Amino acid sequence: MPTEESLRPLDALNARVMQHPAAARLTLMSRILLAVAFIPTGSVKLMGERFTSLGVNTSVGAFFEAMYQTGAYWRFLGLSQVVAGLLLLIPATAFYGAVLFLPILVNVVVITLAIEFKGTPMVTLPMLLANLWLLAWDWPRWRAVLITEKSRPVVRTWSRLERAGWLLGAASVAAFLFAIRGAALKGTAGALVGLGVIGGLMVVTAWVRGARGR
């Protein structure tokens, strides 16, 4: 078992990183992007719909069709992704969402590499790295398992404008993914992109105001 002394360098590193505004925002963005990437696609599976239109004459199409035909297992995959995404969006449960996403993302990465899903590993691998970042961010929780509980440094808060921007951006991206998947909101993709841009501008404006205030 590790000792208190051996964990001090990791404690110090985590404390420095957590108090940096850029690191805190990277954590927030990672949570939002993983959530909006998997909640819509998971919802498609949960509703019992096919994930791809590729034919069974391709390895990718055959693989997803085989999983789709399992029925209950297909819906279970969707439920797991939706639950993990929702947990990430709630600050009090974000840690558990990151833990649940780890096996999901490892599985997704292995699948995309194994069946030669062209180009997709360029997306799934960064997703896995983002999830590993989230797990590292919550180092104090892992430390408690290894040795003793340690209090977390206070993370800097954000203005109402920035919070509203993140909320608007996340909601518009999730709705956009629903729209292009054909699950709902058909014909609204352009408007949703515009709302996402507005949300991004709100966040950037809040950053600029904060920088000038300091």
Image (cartoon, rainbow, N blue to C red):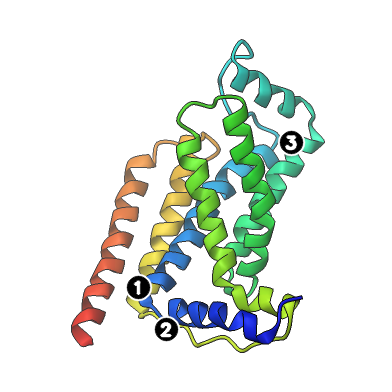
Q: Residue at x 35, y 80 (%)?
A: 159
Q: Which of the 4 image quadrants contains residue 3?
A: bottom right
Q: Is the residue marked by circle 1 packed among few (<14), some (14-19), or many (20+) residues within 10 Å?
A: many
What amino acid is labelled 1 in the image?
Glu
Q: Is residue 55 toward the left or the right of residue 197 in the image? A: right
Q: Is residue 141 toward the left or the right of residue 191 in the image? A: right
Task: Say whether residue 185 is visible.
Answer: no
Q: Which of the 4 image quadrants contains residue 147?
A: bottom right
Element marked by disc 1: helix
Q: Which of the 4 image quadrants contains residue 156?
A: bottom left
Residue hosting label 1: 162
Whichever of callouts 1 and 3 sits on the residue coming sooner in the sequence is 3
Quadrant into which the N terminus falls: bottom right
Kindly report the distance in space between the C-alpha atoms of the residues bearing marks 1 and 3.
37 Å
Query: In the picture shown, does residue 53 fall above or below 179?
Result: above
Q: Is the residue marked by circle 3 packed among few (<14), some (14-19), or many (20+) residues within 10 Å?
A: many
What amino acid is labelled 3 in the image?
Trp
Residue hosting label 2: 156
**Image marks 1 and 3: residues in contact by CB distance under 8 Å:** no
Locate residue 12, reporting x and y percent.
Answer: 51, 83
Residue hosting label 3: 74
Whichever of callouts 1 and 2 sits on the residue coming sooner in the sequence is 2
What amino acid is labelled 2 in the image?
Arg
Kindly report the distance in space between the C-alpha atoms of the residues bearing marks 1 and 2.
13 Å
Locate residue 179, reporting x and y percent.
Answer: 47, 39
Kindly report the distance in space between the C-alpha atoms of the residues bearing marks 3 and 2.
40 Å
